[in-house]
Image: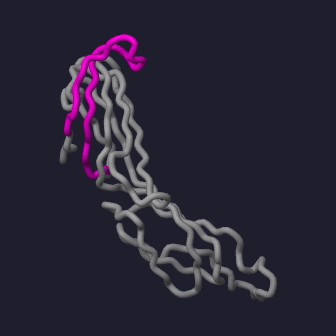
């Protein structure tokens, strides 16, 4: 099992009236391939025990197309050498037109594994004036092939307003603020 790379940038003592607690604080960066949840010990973050850990994305991604989602939970807050459980992943969204021929779509940010991918439709072409549908001709958009960097899609008839959501593992940095003793 590979351990995250942790860089502590600053350690300090918290005093009144800081508003986020008393004790000690450590700030820094945690870098890893976030393909599963990670348990990180208090000592790795420069503290004897943890009460709170605040995480924010430390990597700048393409605006509007990809984002980092992160959730953290401190196990047994205040206990000596306790852990923080971290789960982080990439989420990417976009819009596209789907037609009867296979088309490829690249993700703005590469995943480090296969993401969970969903394609949603807006309005069907059959509801548009002048489009003649026959029985069995309507096939919703679907994923034909998928890789960590792209996917291909198909569907008939053409649907002008489809969207996709992909959620999966990525390799990126997170900023942390750890409060404890």
Q: Position of residue 170 (x, y in %)?
A: 33, 56
Residue 43 in the image, given as x and y percentages of width and height: 19, 27
Q: Quadrant of residue 74?
A: top left
Magenta stretch bounds:
7-34
Magenta segment, prevailing SS (helix, strand or loop): strand
In the picture, measured across the screen, residue 78 lies left or right of residue 64, that is left
**Residue 48 within the segment the image draws in magenta:** no
Residue 81 falls in image quadrant: top left
Residue 80 percent coordinates (x, y): 24, 18
**Total labels drawn:** 0
Q: Residue at x 27, y 32 (%)?
A: 27
Q: Residue at x 59, y 83 (%)?
A: 99
Q: Going by the picture, which residue comes out furthest to the top?
A: 16
Residue 77 at x, y = what percent?
A: 34, 20
* 54, 138: nearer the viewer: 54
Q: Quadrant of the C terminus?
A: top left
Residue 99 higher or lower than 35, as above or below: below
Image height check: is 104 above or below 68? Answer: below
Q: Residue at x 25, y 36 (%)?
A: 28
Instruction: Answer with left or right where residue 175 lies relative to residue 63.
Output: left
Q: In the image as oriented, which residue stretches furthest toward the right?
A: 129
Residue shown at the point (76%, 86%) measured from the top left: 131
Quarter of image, res 15? top left
Please indicate whether residue 126 sits to the left or right of residue 112 in the image.
Answer: right
Determine if residue 143 is in view: yes
């Amino acid at each position: 099992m590979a351990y995250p790379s942790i860089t502590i940038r600053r350690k300090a003592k918290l005093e009144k009236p800081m508003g986020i607690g008393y004790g000690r604080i450590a700030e820094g960066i945690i870098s890893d391939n976030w393909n599963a949840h990670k348990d990180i010990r208090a000592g790795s973050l420069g503290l004897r025990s943890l009460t709170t850990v605040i995480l924010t994305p430390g990597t700048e991604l393409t605006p509007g197309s990809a984002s980092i989602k992160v959730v953290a939970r401190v196990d047994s807050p205040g206990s000596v050498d306790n852990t923080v459980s971290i789960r982080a992943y990439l989420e990417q969204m976009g819009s596209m037109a789907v037609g009867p021929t296979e088309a490829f779509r690249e993700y703005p940010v590469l995943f480090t594994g296969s993401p969970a991918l969903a394609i949603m439709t807006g309005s069907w072409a059959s509801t548009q004036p002048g489009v003649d549908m026959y029985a069995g001709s309507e096939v919703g958009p679907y994923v034909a092939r998928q890789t960590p960097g792209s996917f291909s899609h198909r569907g008939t008839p053409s649907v002008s307003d489809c969207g996709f959501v992909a959620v999966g593992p990525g390799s990126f940095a997170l900023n942390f603020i750890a409060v404890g003793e």
